[in-house]
Amino acid sequence: MKSILLSLPLALATSPALPAQSASVHVPMEDGTRIAVDVYLPEAVALESDDVRVPTLLELTRYWRSSEDTRGAPRNALQPLDHFFLENGYALLKVDVRGTGASFGSRDMEYGRQEVRDGYDVVQWVVEQPWSDGTVGAFGTSYSGTTADLLAATGHPAIKAVIPGWSDFDLYRSPGRPYGLSVEFVQRWGTLVGWMDANDASQLGGTVRRVDGDSEGVLRAAAVAEHAANVDVDEAARANVFRDDAFGDGEDTWGHGSSIHWRSETEKAGVPMLVLASWLDAGTAEGALLRYANFSNPQKVVILASNHGGAFHASPFVVGGRASAPVPALEEQMELRLAFFEHHLRGVDNGVEDWPGIRYFHLGAEEFRETEVWPPAGVRRERFYFRDAGLLALEPPPHDAEAEAWDLYDVDFGASTGAANRWWTQMGGPVLSLDDRGEMDARMLTYTSEPLEEDLELTGWPSVTLHVTSSVTDGAFLVYLEDVAPDGRSRYLTEGGLRALHRAIDPDPDFPREAERLPFHSFERADVAPLFPGEPTELRLRMWPTSVRIAAGHRLRVAIAGADRGTFERLPAEGTPRIGVSRGASGLSFVELPVVRD
């Protein structure tokens, strides 16, 4: 979800004058609900002019379209990218989605179906304005990246291109309840948006901007009063354990708030997309790849090794404990977006059609690569087995159908990926301190290969098959893939996980082609499958996709934990579970890697 750290504090901490050609109005939706919209026009256009018409770019946000200081003076909420678009002749609209900011209405969930329908009405209002040339695009990061994605599903003919940045493709799996677990960042995020919905100046140091003509704030107060009916985000996320649980008093589920739900509408509309994501940012890269491989609308995908939003580089081969400049630079990211809109909204022949389908960053080699298909050509899946003495090897353990072999592990609830990991970056901060995992490795059950004789290239989804026992009926199983340098320093590459009660494999997955080689889980109530203490059970899970070069002489490590302190809920709440991992007659355990051999 969009970075509060990147948007809100900047908007509240600075107060240059608003552009002269701006207006703030309420736009009525089909059901009469009034949505607050700020209009910014380039210098060549006057608000009432019929002489110059320009394309329009929308950002539908959950984080106040703009704000006022405590004295009621408006502050400029425009970011450098916004000014860049205005300077290049685009009209710009900032929209408070229903139930937020100065907009009326309430919300049972994030990205609800009514919110998507509102997008159509906003676009219709735009094309009726005297400054509009009838073409519309949408862009954004995180929450507004997702609303840009969902706007394409409305089917309005004026929408010619969208740029979803670091968006939420499957709201349940990322970032709502990754692995089926309650995630701590949602609590902090829920608190922040709760303050915003209540227009709480004491917590935020400012208020949402009033629309023009609302000098006494009467309309704003009335809108905020309606927000009191909004669902408590954190409370609902913790309560809605299953993907088909409904939010609040409505009928929308986690699934309805996901781009997956709108697949047929998105394909029918055929709106071109430029999708930005990162290997190190929650599940944004997986969402981008699943959409690319399964949705028919035209797409260009760029996968960085960045934080959420692209402001900082996040490769563990480069970044230690301090923030690092993004790759590519922010200016290049802005130019990329502009070129895409210039082509699709203005018809400029600028080579966009010749861009590769996917441009992705290759960790370790620290370079970008290109492909038209996913997975790329030359990838084959190879198993590395868990062996005795903590060894990870291509060869399975010696076969003995009668011999049991177990590694026992008492869950260490102090294990952690820190406070700047792939989940906490959803608040906009950098990804840090994943380059030296030795202390945490010692708290986990690990399997490590011999030094590699040659470079090992991985691109795609790793997956894990565990044959386990547990002393409890439920719990978290978290698995990390790491690079271990010759000096013993281990670097985080990616992770996967599963809450045990969700272990049933989905019999009807959204993406059957991927399910032929990767495990998918429904996370639905009907498929709940608790563990039976002491009984061997198979757990299959996929890890978040990555692309990485592990250099010759380095070793590959798989680390298994039952907790990530500070990130996920503790399961169980009390006691110390003991788990066993089988290497023998009860089943072989292994990681399956997408190895590039060509």
Image: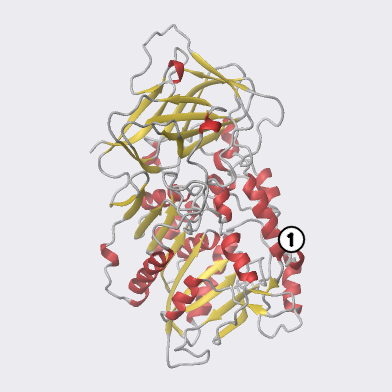
Label 1, secondary structure: give it. Answer: loop
| Residue situated in front as seen by the camera: 461 or 481 | 481
Q: Quadrant of the C terminus?
A: top left
**Quick check: 383 above or below 163?**
above
Measured from the top left, where is residue 358 in percent x and y?
Answer: 33, 54
The local crowd at label 1, few if under 14, some if 14 to 19, many if 20 or more residues have their Cα within 10 Å, is some
Q: Is residue 39 above or below residue 100?
A: below
Pointer 1 residue = 229
Q: Is residue 445 above or below residue 12?
A: above
Determine whether 323 is above or below 458 in the image: below
- The residue drawn where x is 48% and y is 10% is 404
Q: Is residue 324 visible?
A: yes
Residue 327 placement (x, y as % from top left) = 40, 57
What is the count of numbered marks? 1
Check the image and tell me how it is coloured: secondary structure
Circle 1: residue type:
Ala
| Image location (x, y in percent) of residue 446 | 49, 25
Quarter of the image where the N terminus is located: bottom right
Residue at point 48% right, 59% down? 311
Q: Residue at x 60, y 82 (%)?
A: 17
- 213 sits to left or right of 272: right
Q: Is residue 225 left or right of residue 43?
A: right
